[in-house]
Amino acid sequence: MTSFALRLNARDEVVLVRGEESVNLGPRKEACEEMLRFLNELSLLQRTGAFAE
């Protein structure tokens, strides 16, 4: 499993960090809303068995 971290930068943007790599996910509000949508979809896939761990 890959480890990562979410951080806020000085401009209040969410940054996804994995090892030496980082990706700016955008303004905090929009990035958090997108992450919640993603996690909800992933949860649904896991519950229905459409996603194998």
Image (cartoon, rainbow, N blue to C red):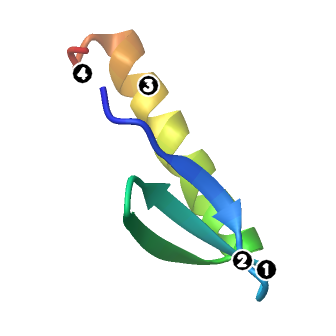
Q: Quadrant of residue 27?
A: bottom right
Sequence-earlier tag: 4 or 3? 3
Question: Is label 2 in a helix, a strand or a loop?
Answer: loop
Q: Disc 4, disc 2: CB below 8 Å?
A: no
Residue 25 lies left or right of residue 8; in this view the side is left
Q: Quadrant of residue 28?
A: bottom right
Q: Quadrant of the C terminus?
A: top left
Is disc 2 surrounded by few (<14), some (14 to 19) or many (20+) residues within 10 Å?
few
Q: Nearer the viewer, mark 4 or mark 2?
A: 2
Q: CA distance from mark 2 to mark 3?
A: 31 Å
Residue where numbered disc 2 is placed: 9
Sequence-earlier tag: 1 or 4? 1
Q: Amino acid at mark 3?
A: Leu
Q: Amino acid at mark 4?
A: Phe
Q: Quadrant of the N terminus?
A: top left
Compared with 9, 43 (above or below) is: above
